[in-house]
């Protein structure tokens, strides 16, 4: 198993109400894969959360910022994080990986900030061969969401970590995640149940996806109000008991040693 692979949750909340009131933070995820550092989905507060973490995470050490889609709860701090990664734009460095429409038209990502990054790459659907430092990156098929939204698969040595961002449930998309056979699957589950059809997973759907993908470790995050009311930790425990895998409900500041968790499940 890979030696050093960690993720720190700079936020675990999602949806407008939770983010607007910061019931849970929305700073995204910061990965260490050996020497390679990647920040995924820098939502509102990402920079403050990174710098105020103990010990602080230094954006100047980032190798890449990856964006699943351009909604505020994922991209609110993207320009601030790019400026921090590039020392206010004075040091052109790093990689920015985002769907095509994040670079176009009505987008939080400002062209002036994008220009500070050394390498900008468009994340195309179902594409492999992206590379950041020691990490190989592939993308999921396009999710059903209001803007172009893509999940990502990280491969670091023999560890595979998948991130399944927001989007409506789709069995063929879930099957595609399963085909990548991730050791760790991070799933955004915003809603507990659905009165109307919205482009987000419900708890039951997220659980179905975990059953289909069967990772060693499933991590739930990006909770809306109704999910928080249902106690995500208790729900994750049910999944763990029923499916015989490690299931974790993320909270703000949670740090997970991915390699160790996967190794513990594999025994
Ligand atoms: Zn979202
Ligand atoms: Zn969204």
Image: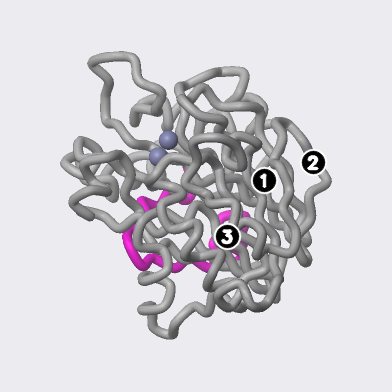
Question: Counting other residues with Cα less than 10 Å from the Cα at mark 2, is it few (<14), some (14-19), or many (20 or more)?
Answer: some
Q: Which residue is mark 2?
A: 128
Instruction: Please provide percent x and percent y for residue 149.
Output: 55, 33
User: Is residue 126 toward the left or the right of residue 221 in the image?
Assistant: right
Residue 229 shows up from this direction? yes
**Dot placed on the residue nearer the N-terminal end, 2 or 1:** 2
Query: Toward which corner of the image does residue 254 lie, by quadrant?
Result: bottom left
User: Is residue 196 toward the left or the right of residue 63 in the image?
Assistant: left
205 or 84: nearer the viewer? 84
Residue 113: assigned label: 3
Please report the bounds of the magenta region as a residue range.
Answer: 244-267
* Cβ at disc 1 under 8 Å from ligand 1: no
Q: CA distance from mark 3 to mark 2?
A: 26 Å
In the displayed structure, would residue 129 be above or below residue 127?
below
In the displayed structure, would residue 57 be above or below residue 67?
below
- Nearer the observer: mark 1 or 3; the answer is 3
Instruction: Tell whether position 39 is magenta.
Output: no
């Amino acid at each position: 198993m890979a030696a050093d692979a960690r993720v720190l949750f700079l936020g675990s909340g999602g949806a407008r109400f939770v983010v607007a009131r910061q019931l849970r933070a929305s700073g995204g995820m910061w990965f260490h894969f050996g020497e390679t550092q990647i920040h995924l989905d820098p939502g509102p507060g990402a920079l403050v959360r990174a710098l105020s973490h103990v010990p602080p995470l230094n954006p100047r050490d980032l190798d890449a910022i990856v964006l699943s889609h351009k909604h505020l709860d994922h991209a609110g701090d993207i320009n601030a994080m790019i400026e921090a990664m590039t020392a206010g734009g004075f040091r052109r460095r790093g990689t920015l990986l985002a769907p095509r429409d994040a670079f176009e038209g009505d987008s939080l990502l400002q062209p002036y900030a994008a220009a500070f990054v050394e390498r900008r790459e468009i994340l195309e659907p179902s594409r492999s061969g992206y590379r950041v430092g020691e990490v190989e990156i592939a993308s999921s098929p396009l999710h059903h969401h209001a803007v172009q939204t893509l999940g990502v698969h990280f491969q670091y040595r023999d560890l595979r970590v998948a991130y399944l961002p927001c989007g409506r449930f789709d069995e063929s998309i879930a099957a595609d995640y399963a085909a990548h056979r991730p050791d760790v699957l991070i799933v955004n589950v915003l809603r507990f149940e659905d009165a109307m059809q919205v482009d987000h997973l419900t708890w039951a759907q997220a659980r179905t996806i975990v059953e289909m993908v069967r990772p060693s470790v499933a991590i739930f995050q990006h909770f809306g109000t109704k999910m928080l009311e249902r106690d995500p930790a208790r729900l994750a425990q049910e999944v763990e008991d029923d499916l015989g895998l490690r299931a974790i409900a993320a909270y703000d500041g949670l740090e997970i040693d991915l390699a160790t968790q996967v190794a513990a499940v594999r025994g």
